[in-house]
Amino acid sequence: MRKWPCICFGLLLLAASLTGCSDRDSAAASGSTASFEQQTSEPLQSAEENPEPSEAASVPERAEGEETPAASAGTPTVFMTRDISPAGLMAVYEALGAELPEENVAVKISTGENGSNYLRPELIGDLVQAVNGTIVECNTAYGGDRANTAYHMQLAEDHGYTAIADVDIMDADGSMTLPVNGGSRITENYVGSHFADYDYYVILSHFKGHAMAGFGGAIKNISIGIASSDGKAHIHSGGTGGSMWGGEQDAFLESMAEAGKSVSDYMNGNMLYINVMNRLSVDCDCDGSPAEPDMHDIGILASFDPVALDQACIDLVYSAEDGASLIERIESRNGLLTLEHADEIGLGSRVYNLVNIDE
């Protein structure tokens, strides 16, 4: 592939300064995630606007490999399983029917700070090895155990990742530049210089809250996650080049969407996305002392569309009876703006077809 010349960070003090918490009468949307048949979903905006989750439409079972009517009409499909296990992860991946090359496959995860809820190698190992993947990450821009390559590689070993695959810190040798088309905040995105070494990306994300972005999922993993340490600062500043600690919030959120689109454009469809909805803390895996989750695990979701995937996860949180804390975190940071802007600039679609592979 051609080459061009990757913040997630747990800044709790800065997060504490962010305001705008919602005054919602009921913090969690009423309803249950207990039944998910195939459905076409419009995105939820807030619990006030959508007090009830959308009802699942009853449809005949699909024959193996048969497209759903919505999918054939161009609506992206999101597959889901409640089985959060190595077998469940493999099943939802296989439901996509993706055709991957035999080599040069990257599996982008967050290696996570010590003490965080990072995805355990015992959960993801079978998938990583099935795709013959290299685990890829980029250094942080906020200090800690992942701020430079040597420390980061040691942490990857300590967390068990080097035991299941090769690990590549993609900005160990600096950055490469991707153009941003159709954005309003940034014109360039700076990613790890090893980004172009891979022909296909499996974006494997732990869906959870985030102290600055409100939530983290697929879009955050391909924007902040693939950005080099310099690129992370650039996104956080909203493209102004100013302090990443004091960037305007909406500019940061929209810059994430735009950076993610530059990655998607460069890969030209050679990507798939998987979100694991377990350990649903309000805090991200860049936080070594995250709040203990106070809602139940939900499942694993997969799609070829990162916007549809993240929107489906958001809708499941809003539909959960115990999602109040995570909903408050998302809304207090205006986190839904990332999805709105991503849809506007063509990164993906907030309308999707949800298929439960357990049924």
Image (spheres, helix red, strand yellow):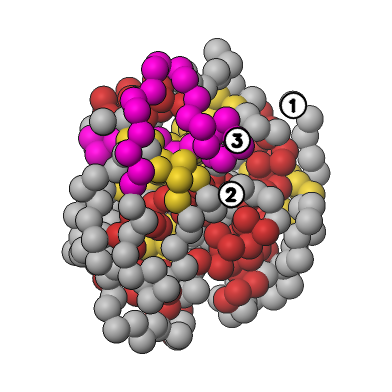
Residue at the image position 45 percent from the left and 17 percent from the top: 65
- Secondary structure beneath label 1: loop
Q: Magenta segment, principal secondary structure? A: loop
Residue at the image position 21 percent from the left and 48 percent from the top: 34
Whole-Å distance between the Cαs marked 3 and 1?
A: 32 Å
Circle 3 crowding by C-alpha within 10 Å: few under 14, some 14–19, many from 20: few
Q: Which of 313 and 250 is in front in this view?
A: 313
Regarding residue 337, the answer to whether it shows in the image is yes
- Secondary structure beneath label 2: loop
Q: Earlier in the sequence, mark 2 or mark 1?
A: 1
User: Can you identify the residue that label 2 sits on?
Assistant: 349
Is 66 one of the magenta-colored residues?
A: yes
Q: On screen, 23 above or below 156?
A: below
Residue 51 coordinates in the image, percent (x, y): 33, 70
Tell me the amino acid under the disc marked 3: Ala
Whole-Å distance between the Cαs marked 2 and 1?
A: 27 Å
**Residue 99 appears in which quarter of the rendering?**
top right
The residue furthest top is 102
Residue 275 coordinates in the image, percent (x, y): 40, 43
Residue 81 coordinates in the image, percent (x, y): 29, 36
Residue range corresponding to the magenta coloring: 56-84
The circle drawn on residue 1 is: 1
Regarding residue 150, the answer to whether it shows in the image is no
User: Can you identify the residue that label 3 sits on?
Assistant: 73
Whole-Å distance between the Cαs marked 3 and 2?
A: 13 Å
Count of marks, rendered view: 3
